[in-house]
Amino acid sequence: MDKTAFTTRMNAGKVLVSDGATGTNLQMRGLPRGATAELWVLEQPEEIMRLEREFIEAGADLILTCTFGGTTPRLEHYGLAERAAEINRKAVDLARRAAAGTQVLVAGSIGPTGKLLKPLGPLDEAGAVAAFASQAGWLADAGVDFLVIETQFDLGEAKAAIQGVRSVTDLPVVCSFSYDRGVRTMMGVKPAQAGRELADLGVDMLGINCGRSLEENLANLKELKAAELAPETTPGVSLPLWFKPNAGMPRLDEHGDPTYDVTPETMGQLAAQWVTAGAQVVGGCCGTSPEHLRQIVLAVK
């Protein structure tokens, strides 16, 4: 773990390439339909490492741990809550081993809890903060370089995640929203709104991941960039931006499995626009294979 490596590269103005999708790639490799990817951290660790190494070979500068669903509330749904600490720590170890001998950074992935906050759902704010604090603590203790709070859609849950993370670690933090309703999240949040609400809460980078289409995600990136969000601690210095769009919306093939129509070549052709629009870290979300990522790398480096 190097608490300064990510921040140093960001401050140097380097464009970094993140990895691609975890869940959808593992599904294509045999992860049972309906199973959480974290199950394979325990049962098929070599497949997790194989995918991570393929992203590194494609040119990724950083990889995310297979812990998107690693909060205790989310793992409860799969009967894995009692193994939450083990899953998170082992996922970091797998990523570290995959990146051994390289300069690739390891980011701890933190996704939503899978439960809405009260009054819309069963989870209260204190419970959410505690769940995120626990996961962040496991990831930090296991040796990640920074943390990525990703695929957020609710400002209340995102704030709880940041509060929980900041209560246990001073590692750099990215917070990224998913605009699955085009230019808004499912809770109606727009990119500039999310940025304004979060810029002063101790995040080091704001971002966009997943979503509905590459075109809409690019529009969202431009809106976030135009807001020129700067924390009060560093007025005039806008936060860097993180951008991992998905390879379009999935459709089901004849076997009922999801497929993505955006080709690696198409994604690569568009990637330079993401950097021009202001993204300093680029990569891909759902449907983004190692070959997609290779084309992104060729476009931006």
Image: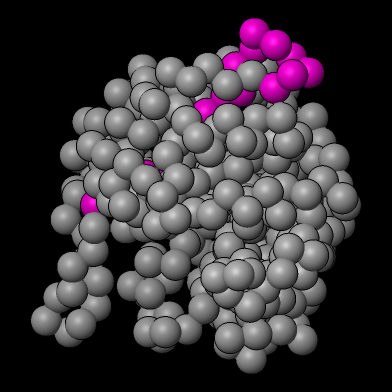
Left or right? Give the position of 48 relative to 286: right
Going 40% across and 57% down the picture, which residue do you hit?
186
Q: What segment is highlighted magenta in the picture?
A: 231-248
Left or right? Give the position of 65 relative to 187: right
Residue 241 falls inside the magenta stretch: yes
Quarter of the rendering occupied by the C terminus: top left
Q: Where residue 107 sits in the image (x, y, percent)?
A: 66, 48
Q: Nearer the viewer, residue 233 or 247?
A: 233
Counting every numbered tag in the picture gives 0
Going 37% across and 45% down the picture, which residue do you hit?
184
Residue 229 falls inside the magenta stretch: no
Residue 19 visible in the shown view:
no
Q: Quadrant of residue 237?
A: top right
Q: Where residue 196 sits in the image (x, y, percent)?
A: 58, 30
Going 79% across and 30% down the picture, which residue do you hit?
4
Q: Nearer the viewer, residue 125 or 5?
A: 125
Q: Where residue 167 sits in the image (x, y, percent)?
A: 87, 50
Is 231 rendered above or below residue 205?
Answer: above
Residue 49 visible in the shown view:
yes
Residue, far front? 119
Q: Quadrant of residue 71?
A: bottom right
Going 36% across and 17% down the picture, which residue do you hit?
276
The secondary structure making up most of the magenta span is loop
Q: Nearer the viewer, residue 289 or 72?
A: 72
Is 24 rendered above or below residue 35?
Answer: above
